[in-house]
Every structure is written in structure tokens, then in C-alpha cells.
């Protein structure tokens, strides 16, 4: 393996806390233990770039794993060693339970097929997680021959155990100091390499999705759902990388195990782990009818009731599952949360408690080329840092800098704030590091998208209540309101109901003697300078005339259109994009005028709107002779509203009832009236 610049930087910044990830895969295939167990040992003996030291460390790790992990068929051999030597060291997952008959705790070591191993109450008190899902540990297993002679004796006992996880107190300081030596793109790549992926093989969308998978580890009470194709490694992070996560495979989930055991008072998984992940979620069901309701209450408040007591926990809930079909087909036959269990899939109240819907279809199917061979942070160090970050928040970084749009409800605000906070903690583990506007905007856009995806599914089930999904944000007090959509809803050449970016507008050209009507989008940007520049080459003559009329009207009536702004002090760049056979862009002057004013005012045009009409140099609105045809074309293109000159009103008496019910037709008298009706409120 050739070291690259990022390897050299990582090994310098995190000396002793990085490991070559290809070594991990070598061992994880040989021995029946999770990745973080292998990395625990590799981090101890191979955290160096010196090849000789790595080889020496690999031999030690090989010996320890060979001597301490129990392969199928070797169980009796290890038990015999314990008898002959008095004790044996093993690496295994240890779980415990209370045996009320003897008033003692007994442990289970699955790899040795032992279900009655003695251990002290002090061990259980110190490591309560062994009572819920258990954890991997280095165990010294003793054998007492005298106890073996007793009736119902338990000769095997745990003499000592060491959980396989880091316990250093200053891990966050080390992470923060090391992070300061990386740029943000470099740091994102280090995080991805640390969980086993090679960023050079991933698209930006895939990188974003993989970083979102990490948010439940750093954000308390975070509820995430990921649905997508099979084979994208959805459960890998929650099973292999962190000892603070617990994976529940498809099947029955008991309320006692998840939350609290009423008979013993023992706290459940959400109290013991940072993240509880339901794998193959379509097959999950609770043993009690009110199981989903208890989970709903917990996802909302982080609390659940046991008799008169209310118990708080901060474990995050992650639901992962597979689509049987592709995303487009899933949207046609229902909604994107369709793979959830029946008691969850159509429950809008349950959906509302999901903070994010991660687009699993953006992650490529796993193949050897996606796995990194470079250095990444050791898993136990990284997972310990993640666990400590849960006690911090980055919401204060948003104050005064980021403003959410009016479409967000209280739960929406809570969801996007938690997602932004989690993403910023991943990028900036040191709370004192200044956060750049660029990174803040990246986190805001991603947070709005993954929350809006939840709202869009709610809208499909209960349209009236969840009608307004136009999520937006404004960066800074003088910033432009930016709307965020989910990519799977967008389609080129069809009108969505999204407010467009400032300076953009949909328009229909009415056509002419030798050209049919056609759909166009005008895109205008403004900057310092003067004049209007059309970027199309060559510029269609008819469109050139429309732009000339729009420009002169903007200059002549600036005070009525854009207030105290001086359009002559700005240069406008205009691009005409056609979506039909029509190419001339003829008679689109009103749309051009609105687009110029929208760019100057930094205000968006309403979503789902098409504007039709031409304006003369003197400001007169030219007549349109085929208004019915244009209205029918607007419906075909998916428009919700059509803005026409008022002179077209009588023509529309001939519009069919079916078409009239699908389109909201509005009329304008002049350019200013058209502008006011087109801008988003």
C-alpha cells in the first residue's frame, strides 16, 4: 500500500490512534468477532506506519486472536485448558442474568456454549450492559474442580474481564487537537476511512449519506430511518464499528428488553446503549400491543413510563430496511415508508417522530473497491469520542446565523436542529472551533432534505394536514431565502411545486406561424456592472427582442417594480432553457421582466407557476390568441397555476371542466401586477 498525503497527515495528527483498515478486514474474516474487537488489538500493537513494527504487531494480534477466540468445534478444547491450567483467556461476548433460585448472577459465554458461569455482583454492577445485550470483553475464565464435585455446582467462573472499549478521559481533546490540522473535506475523508470506506470511490451524495449514518452516535435521542436497496451495508456501522450500538435483527422485540422489565426493574437497551438499530425493520413486531405506542412516546420525549415512574433514556433509534422495488416504483405504488411494519407504515404520528429519512439508494452496493486500504482512526477511539460528543450540542452555533423558513412546524424545527447539531459535531468535535458558513449551509441543506422526505410521505397519507412542505433557510440576516427539495421528487422539464431560486421562472412561449407553443425556463443572475447579457449562443432573435423590451421596462419603471434599487447599477446574465421543440423563446417578455426583478429583489417566484405574456417597449401587454392551448399545455407540464394577461379571460370559457379543475388561472393587467402575483409570499 502506498501512503498518500492524508495517511501521512492522519498518522502525524493521531499518532497511536490510527490503524490500516485493510489489516482489519484480513483478521475479521479469519476470526468470529466484530471489527471493533480486531481494531482494539490492532490499535494496541499496530498503530504505526513503520512496516517492521506493523509486522511484529500483526504477529502478536494473530497469536492473541488465535489463542483467545473460540472457533466452532474448539469449545471443549478451551474448557479442557481451563481445567488443566486453572484458567484460560478468551475473547467473547458476555451476557448475564439473575438466577433467582440461587440468588446469584450467572453469565453466558456463547462461543464456549456455557450458560452458567459464575460472576460476582460487583462485576454486574460495574458493567450493567451484560444484563441487556451483553458486550465483547477479554475474559479470564477460571475452573474450580472442587465446585465441580458439588451437586448443581458451577465450576466455571469469570475471574476478571476487560470490556473491549476505550476508557481514556481525554479522548475528545485528542480528537479536537488532531482535527484542527485538517481541512473540512480532508476530515470528512478521514471519518469515512475510519468506518472502512474509501472516499475516492464515492460520490458526494454517497458521502453525505454515510456521514448521516453516524449522526445517531453523536446525537442523543435521534430517530433515523434508512430504506434502500439490499447490499449497501446499512447495518454494518451499527454491528461492527461501535460497542455502544446494539443491532436487533428482524423479529419480535420485547418491551421488557427494549425499555424496562417490570418484574425486575432492569433497564432495557435504550438505557444501556447509545444506538439501538432495528435491522430488516419490515419483519419487526413487539410482543405487546402497546409496544409501538411506548416506542412512539419514547421517540418523542426520550421518556417511558413504568408504573408510576417515568424513566429517561438517551439511546437513539435507527430503523433500516430494504425496498423490494426501485424508488420511482415505490413512489408510484405508495410512499417511501411502505417497507415499515404494518403498525408503523401509515401512522403519520409515528412518522412525525422520525428526525431524518436517509436516502439508502444514494449509497452504492458494497464491493471490494469501496473498502479503503488506508489509515483511519481506531474504532474504539472513534466510538468513545462519538459517545462523549452526545453530551454536547451545536444548536447555539445556529443562533443569529441560520434562520429556518415558515413552513417548518415545531417538530420539524426540533428534527433539523438535531441533524445540524449532529453533523456539525462530526465535522467540528471541538466546540470552540469557528464553523464556516459553507459547512453550516451544507448541514442545513442536508438536514432539511432528510426531514422533508419524512414530511412528503406524511403528505401522501394525510395531505391536508401536511400540505406545506416547502422547507427553506436563510443564512445571515441579509441572506437569500433558499428552498430545499428532495431529489427524488424533481424531474427535469416538469413543473414541481417548489419555489424556484431567485431569478428563475417558468414560461410558455405561445409560438407563431412556424413554431408550436413550448415550455422554457429563464434563469437570471445579477452582479456588479450594468446591462443585460444573454448567455445563449446564438441568441434567438425573438427572445432577444423580448429581453430588450423587458430590460427597458425594468429601467423605465424601476421605482414601481423594485423600489429604491437601481437596476442600471447591476449586470444581469440571462439563460434561456427550452424543454420542447420550440427554440425561439418568442413573446416571453413578462416572464423575463419578472425574472430580472426577482434576481434584483432576491425573492423567489412561487412554486408551480407558469407565466405567459409579452410586453412592448411602452409597457403595453400584447394579446394572446391561443390561451386555451397554453392552459392545456400548462396542465400537461404539471403546473399548479397559470398567470395570463387579463385580455385572455373570455377565451378560457372554452377550457374544459376537467382542465379547469386542475389549474388555478390568474390574470394580470400590467408588468407590476404580474410581478406582485408571481413572487412567493
Image (cartoon, rainbow, N blue to C red):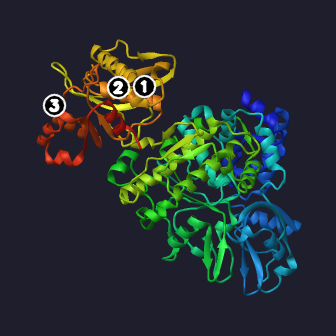
Q: Position of residue 571 (x, y in %)?
A: 47, 19
Going from N to C along the chain, the mark reached first, 1 or 2, is: 1
Q: Of residues 167 and 247, which is closer to you in this image?
A: 167
**Is there any visible trace of residue 527 in the rendered image?**
yes
Name the residue located 62 percent from the left edge and 66 percent from the top edge. 302
| SS under mark 1 | strand
| SS under mark 3 | loop
Query: Label 1: which residue?
Result: 524
Give the CA distance from mark 3 to mark 1.
27 Å
Q: Left of 397 or right of it: where is 444?
A: left
Q: Position of residue 538 (x, y in %)?
A: 35, 12
Q: Position of residue 421 (x, y in %)?
A: 64, 49
Name the residue located 30 percent from the left edge and 20 percent from the top edge. 546
User: In the current view of this chain or complex, which residue is farthest to the top?
Assistant: 538
Q: Left of 104 or right of it: where is 404?
A: left
Name the residue located 17 percent from the left edge and 48 percent from the top edge. 658
Mark 3 and mark 1 in contact? Answer it, CB < 8 Å: no
Query: Label 2: which residue?
Result: 592
Circle 1 residues within 10 Å: few <14, some 14–19, many ≥20: many
Q: Of residues 395 and 323, which is closer to you in this image?
A: 395
| SS under mark 2 | helix
Mark 3 and mark 2 in contact? Answer it, CB < 8 Å: no
Give the CA distance from mark 3 to mark 2.
20 Å
Circle 2 residues within 10 Å: few <14, some 14–19, many ≥20: many
Give me the disc on residue 626.
3
Q: Quadrant of residue 56?
A: top right
Give me the disc on residue 566.
none
Q: Quadrant of residue 415?
A: bottom right
Amino acid at each position: 500500500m502506498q501512503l498518500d498525503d492524508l495517511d501521512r497527515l492522519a498518522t502525524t495528527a493521531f499518532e497511536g490512534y490510527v490503524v490500516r483498515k485493510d489489516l482489519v478486514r484480513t483478521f475479521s474474516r479469519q476470526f468470529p468477532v466484530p471489527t471493533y474487537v480486531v481494531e482494539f488489538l490492532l490499535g494496541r500493537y499496530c498503530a504505526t506506519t513503520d512496516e517492521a513494527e506493523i509486522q511484529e504487531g500483526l504477529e502478536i494480534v494473530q497469536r492473541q486472536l488465535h489463542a483467545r477466540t473460540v472457533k466452532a468445534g474448539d469449545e471443549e478444547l478451551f474448557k479442557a485448558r481451563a481445567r488443566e491450567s486453572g484458567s484460560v483467556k478468551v475473547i467473547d461476548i458476555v451476557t448475564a442474568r439473575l438466577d433467582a433460585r440461587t440468588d446469584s448472577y450467572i453469565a453466558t459465554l456463547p462461543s464456549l456454549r456455557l450458560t452458567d458461569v459464575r460472576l460476582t455482583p460487583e462485576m454486574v454492577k460495574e458493567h450493567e450492559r451484560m444484563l441487556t445485550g451483553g458486550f465483547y470483553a477479554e475474559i479470564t475464565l477460571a475452573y474450580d474442580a472442587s465446585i465441580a464435585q458439588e451437586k448443581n455446582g458451577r465450576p466455571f467462573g469469570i475471574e476478571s474481564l476487560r470490556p473491549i472499549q476505550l476508557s481514556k478521559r481525554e479522548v475528545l481533546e485528542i480528537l479536537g487537537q488532531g482535527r484542527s490540522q485538517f481541512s473540512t473535506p480532508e476530515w470528512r475523508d478521514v471519518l469515512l476511512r475510519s468506518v472502512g470506506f474509501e472516499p475516492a470511490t464515492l460520490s458526494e451524495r454517497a458521502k453525505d449519506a454515510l456521514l448521516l449514518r453516524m449522526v445517531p452516535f453523536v446525537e442523543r435521542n435521534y430517530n433515523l430511518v434508512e430504506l434502500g436497496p439490499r447490499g449497501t451495508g446499512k447495518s454494518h456501522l451499527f454491528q461492527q464499528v461501535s460497542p455502544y450500538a446494539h443491532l436487533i435483527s428482524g423479529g419480535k422485540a420485547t418491551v421488557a428488553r427494549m425499555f424496562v422489565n417490570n418484574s425486575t426493574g432492569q433497564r432495557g437497551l435504550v438505557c444501556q446503549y447509545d444506538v439501538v438499530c432495528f435491522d430488516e425493520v419490515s419483519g419487526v413486531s413487539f410482543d405487546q400491543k402497546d409496544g409501538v405506542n411506548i416506542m412512539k412516546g419514547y421517540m418523542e420525549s426520550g421518556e417511558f413510563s413504568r408504573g408510576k415512574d417515568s424513566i429517561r433514556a438517551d439511546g437513539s433509534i435507527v430503523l433500516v430496511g430494504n425496498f423490494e422495488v426501485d424508488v420511482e416504483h415505490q413512489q408510484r405504488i405508495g410512499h417511501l415508508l411502505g417497507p415499515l411494519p404494518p403498525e408503523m407504515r401509515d401512522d403519520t404520528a409515528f412518522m412525525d417522530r422520525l428526525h431524518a429519512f436517509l436516502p439508502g439508494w444514494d449509497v452504492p452496493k458494497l464491493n471490494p473497491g469501496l473498502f479503503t486500504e488506508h489509515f483511519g482512526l481506531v474504532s474504539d477511539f472513534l466510538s468513545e469520542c462519538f459517545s462523549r460528543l452526545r453530551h454536547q450540542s451545536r444548536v447555539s452555533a445556529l443562533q443569529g446565523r441560520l434562520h429556518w423558513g415558515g413552513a417548518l412546524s415545531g417538530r420539524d424545527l426540533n428534527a433539523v436542529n438535531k441533524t445540524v447539531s449532529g453533523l456539525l459535531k462530526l465535522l467540528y468535535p471541538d466546540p470552540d472551533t469557528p464553523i464556516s458558513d459553507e459547512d453550516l449551509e451544507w448541514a442545513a441543506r442536508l438536514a432539511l432534505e432528510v426531514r422533508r422526505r419524512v414530511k412528503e410521505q406524511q403528505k401522501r397519507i394525510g395531505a391536508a394536514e401536511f400540505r406545506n412542505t416547502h422547507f427553506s433557510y436563510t443564512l445571515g440576516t441579509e441572506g437569500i431565502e433558499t428552498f430545499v427539495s428532495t431529489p427524488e421528487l424533481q424531474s427535469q422539464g416538469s413543473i414541481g411545486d417548489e419555489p424556484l431560486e431567485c431569478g428563475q421562472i417558468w414560461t410558455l412561449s405561445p409560438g407563431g406561424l412556424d413554431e408550436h407553443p413550448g415550455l422554457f425556463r429563464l434563469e437570471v443572475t445579477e452582479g456588479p456592472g450594468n446591462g443585460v447579457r444573454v448567455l445563449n449562443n446564438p441568441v434567438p432573435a425573438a427572445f432577444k427582442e423580448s429581453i430588450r423590451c423587458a430590460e427597458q421596462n425594468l429601467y423605465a419603471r424601476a421605482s414601481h417594480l423594485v423600489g429604491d434599487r437601481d437596476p442600471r447599477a447591476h449586470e444581469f446574465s440571462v439563460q434561456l432553457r427550452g424543454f420542447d421543440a420550440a427554440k425561439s423563446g418568442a413573446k416571453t417578455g413578462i416572464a423575463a421582466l419578472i425574472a430580472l426583478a426577482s434576481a434584483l429583489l432576491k425573492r423567489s417566484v412561487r412554486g408551480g407557476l407558469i407565466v405567459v405574456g409579452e410586453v412592448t417597449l411602452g409597457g403595453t401587454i400584447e394579446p394572446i390568441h391561443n390561451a386555451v392551448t397554453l392552459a392545456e399545455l400548462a396542465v400537461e407540464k404539471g403546473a399548479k397555476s397559470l398567470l395570463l394577461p387579463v385580455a385572455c379571460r373570455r377565451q378560457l370559457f372554452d377550457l374544459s371542466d376537467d382542465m379547469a379543475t386542475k389549474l388555478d388561472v390568474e390574470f394580470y393587467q400590467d408588468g407590476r401586477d404580474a410581478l406582485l402575483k408571481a413572487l412567493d409570499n
